[in-house]
Amino acid sequence: MLLLIFAPQAILIGTVFQRQGWIYWWANWGARTWLKLSGVKVKVTGREHLDPDQPYVFVSNHSSYLDAAPLFAFTGRRMGAIAKKELLKAPILGYSMGFVNVMAIDRSNRERAVETIRIATDRLRSGVSIMVCPEGTRAQPGQMLPFKKGAFHMAVEAGAPIVPIALKNSDVLMGKGTGEAWPGTIEMVMLPPVATSWVKTDEDLDALVQQVQNAIMRELGITKLSSRPTKATAPQNRK
């Protein structure tokens, strides 16, 4: 409802007056207001680890529809994101994504996915931090899926550090398979940035992915990765 009421006006005014910062302000306000109206508070720790002049790739676990709002509005900086392409179909939201540096990725098409990562890397080099949930989909409560490597390639190419983020309790307030948010508090723990300048080989990249994911798992108390769900295939007709 907030999107339907405020997004069209914010986009129109920001575009006419060439003030993208105004659109960011409204997007930030919308994320915070949606959480407040849902009875959800956000407790942030770890901002002291960040250099205010340094763009980062923020990498987080993902188990709830609530996750995007704290990541967008509570890191203390202007934030872009890589999101799944299905969001483009959402009324208003899909159209407005590009105005706040949210880029849709089509993981079913490798060439398009690579192009999206390239565009995001250019934005990162220009000083826009990017948030990514590299599990690629929401995990079940208390679980974590293996990270995909796109965000890590992007960070290495741009020479940007990675900030691991552990989101706690969002799966309890609005877990996968539910459509209703319950009042409560999300804890967003921003861990110390991880340098990427040492990554030179594919083996180094794998080690970087492992290092970041292990840091988040330790903070969440998760000891083992869950298997990625396989897509069901249609049964073949029997002759």
Image (tube, helix red, strand yellow):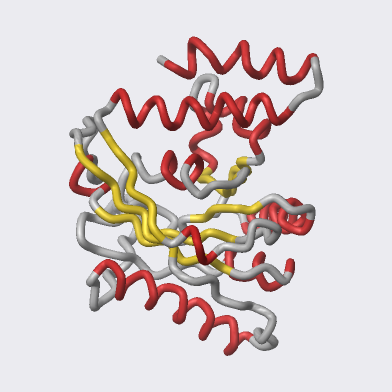
Front residue of 91 and 37: 37
Image x and y of residue 60, in percent: 43, 59
**Whether residue 236 can be seen here:** no
Is 159 above or below relative to 239? below
Q: Residue at x 29, y 47 (%)?
A: 186
Q: Residue at x 68, y 68 (%)?
A: 160
Whether residue 153 sits left or right of residue 84 in the image: it is right
Is 237 above or below relative to 147? above
**Whether residue 53 can be seen here:** yes
Q: Residue at x 39, y 75 (%)?
A: 215
Whether residue 112 sits left or right of residue 60 in the image: it is right
Q: Residue at x 47, y 44 (%)?
A: 74
Q: Quadrant of residue 68?
A: top left
Q: Residue furthest front?
A: 48
Front residue of 200 and 108: 200
The quarter in which the N terminus is drawn is top left
Front residue of 143 and 198: 198
